[in-house]
Amino acid sequence: MEKRTRLILALDVTSRAEARRIVDASKDYLDAIKINWPLILAAGPDIISELSKIKDVVCDMKIADIPNTNRLICEQATSRGASAVICHGFVGEDSVKACVEATKGQVFVVTEMSHPGGKQFTAPVADKLAALARSSGARGIVAPATRPERIADLRKIIGKMEIISPGVGAQGGKASDAIRAGADYIIVGRAIYQSSDPGASAKALADEVRTAVD
Ligand code: O7M
């Protein structure tokens, strides 16, 4: 995955044509595209291969099962061209390690989630989830742009591992705050794909990120 604009598009649209329209408009400002269930279910899993020819694809199925099932899901994603997957850590170390083994380490583990409900169950165990990501050999963690101070806290636990951070725009977080707090990449969905000009919105976010990095 490039580290140029530090912008990952969360492509939560529900048709292949809409997905292509948004990607064509914004691809110059993206380092990767994150695909979640809405698009995979609407367009079929071959959308992973199709988009991976344009940009690195992170498959966000928030994998959360026993190790064998996790492995099977990861193999399906990577065989279609996914560069990385996202899994949950609350299922335990063996389940996370199964993802790490199946993807040769290309795993991001969810820690504290960005929405208000993320405070209920994920926040109290987020430090442990980050430590688990580290001990399991994952590539990085997912941490909330809605609470930049938590990005900074979690950074202390994971050292140089990567942080990808959702919650910018529609959920109220700011791109520059997340980057300054220590995120490597921001993940943005609605602020780009619901925009009347997705290319201009992606460019504005990439510009904001650059000011925070400089
Ligand atoms: O910018 P949005 O709010 O339209 O979209 C945010 C995306 O990030 C969307 O695809 C969510 O599923 C995802 N996300 C969160 O919003 N919060 C989290 O805590 C975690 C994720 C995520 O990407 O997990 C991997």
Image: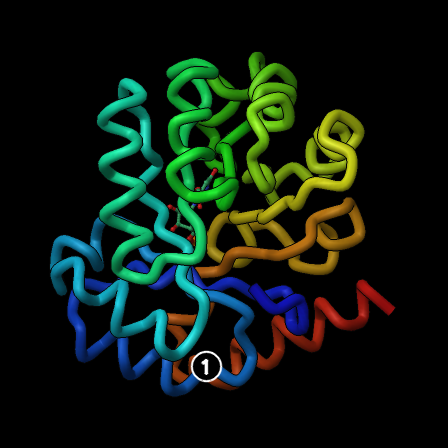
- Relative depth, front residue between 107 and 127: 107
Q: As shown in the figure, which amino acid type bears the numbered disc 1?
A: Ser
**168 is higher (above) or lower (below) than 145:** below
Quarter occupied by the C terminus: bottom right
Q: Where is residue 62 drawn, in percent x and y?
A: 35, 36
Which residue: 47% across, 55% down?
Answer: 170
Which residue: 36% across, 57% down?
Answer: 82
- Relative depth, front residue between 68 and 185: 68
**90 is higher (above) or lower (below) than 64:** above
Give the colouring mode of the picture: rainbow
Q: Badge 1, how many Cα within 10 Å: few under 14, some, many 20+?
A: many
Q: Is residue 49 left or right of residue 194?
A: left
- Name the residue beneath numbered marker 1: 26
**50 is higher (above) or lower (below) than 80:** below
Q: Is residue 55 left or right of residue 16?
A: right
Which residue: 47% across, 27% down?
Answer: 118
- Relative depth, front residue between 96 and 153: 96
Q: Where is residue 174 drawn, in percent x and y?
A: 65, 55
Residue 204 occupies quadrant: bottom right
Q: Is residue 138 left or right of residue 118?
A: right
Q: Where is residue 12 drawn, in percent x and y?
A: 30, 59
